[in-house]
Every structure is written in C-alpha cells, then in structure tokens.
Image (spheres, helix red, strand yellow):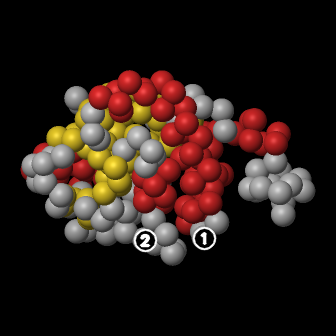
Amino acid sequence: MFCLTCNAFCFSLLCKNCREQFLKIKLKIRVVEDLKIYSFYDYQDMDLLLNTKYYAIGSRVFSLLAKEANAHFLTTHQEFFQQYIVHGVGIDDNPKKGYSHTGVILHAFRNIITPIYGELRAKNKVKYAGKSLEFRQKNPRGLVYKSGSKDLVIFDDIVTTGLSMLEAKKAIEKGGGNVLFGVVLSDAKR
C-alpha cells in the first residue's frame, strides 16, 4: 500500500510523516449568528484528503480524520459529555458513492454522542462545492428534521459560509429539537 499524499510505501492510508504533518488538530470555534461551530483542521492543509469524499476511499479517509478529531474533542470537552445525554445528526447523511461522509464522521463520535442517522434530510439535492454565497442563499437544501425533542450536535464535513449549519439548526428547531453546537472536520473560511 502507498501513502495517499506522498506515495511512500506504508501499511496504512498515510505514512508516519504525513500523519504527523496532516493530522495536526487545530481546534477552532467559529460563531455563525448564535451557533458555535467547532472545526479541527484548516481546509487549505486538508483539501486533498477532504476531496476524497467523492471516491470510495473517502470513507476510510473520513473515518481516520474523524477519529483523530473525536479523540481531541473528548479530551477537551469530556466533562460536558459526562453531564448530558447528547445526540448527533449529520446534515443530509444520505449515502453517495456507497457511503455517507457525514455518517462516517457521526459514527466516529459515537463514544461521546448517540448518533441519529437519516433524520436530517435535504428535499432539494443541491451541490454547494465551489459555489458562491449568493448561489447558496438562492438555493437552500430544504432540510427536514424528523426525530423530535432531543439535545443535538450537528455534524458536517466542511463549514464555508455557515449557511448549511444555520439551515440545519432552523430545521431541527422547527422539528422540536434543541441544537447545542455544530462540529465539522474543517473550516474553509478564507
């Protein structure tokens, strides 16, 4: 097997050197309106790995990234998760290319949250990758939440403008849920 980033021979997705370089957690908190969004990696450092979501290998890459993020988050927020029963929901975790990247992230955090799969779905299948803020504002996903009254953390892969997170928060609140905060692997804010 060869390292995904440098092509060195190794027995995992990333060689030791690339793990040390790319899997450095840089925890950030961005607030969009009144929603806190935690991110773990800078997009410019991770774009190659994050873009694997369009391929089958992405499930393994996202699992690796999310497990590292989860381990860090647990050490910094352990008391919070010991005090509350918290559920997690992925934004439109409908499988594409054989898996759901938000479902994979959600699954990696299952030791601190109770995952709820398939409960925050988009009525409109809009792709936001590479699109402008104006496009995103004019083309909402039409998210619908179905699981009722629960304390929830929203999961996604990347936060760019924050509109998807805000739309998810509104859908969850409309469906009777309480949003605590959002978690993403990467912040693409420039």
Q: Is residue 65 left or right of 115 when viewed as pictured?
A: right
Q: Residue at x 35, y 53 (%)?
A: 115
Q: Residues within 10 Å of mark 2 (few under 14, many from 20)?
A: few
Q: Amino acid at mark 2?
A: Pro
Residue 163 visible to an observer of this rendering: no
Helix, strand or loop at label 2? It is loop
Q: Nearer the viewer, residue 31 or 23?
A: 23
**In this figure, which residue is indicated by the disc labeled 1?**
56
Q: Residue at x 60, y 68 (%)?
A: 55
**Residue 120: image location, x then y, percent:** 26, 59
**Residue 74: image location, x then y, percent:** 48, 32
Vertical relation: 7 (above or below) 84: below
Q: Residue furthest bottom?
A: 98
Q: CA distance from mark 1 to mark 2?
A: 11 Å
Q: Amino acid at mark 1?
A: Ala
Helix, strand or loop at label 1? It is loop
Residue 11 visible to an observer of this rendering: yes
**In this figure, which residue is indicated by the disc labeled 2?**
95
Q: Quadrant of residue 169?
A: top left
Q: Residue at x 75, y 35 (%)?
A: 20
Q: Residue at x 36, y 44 (%)?
A: 113
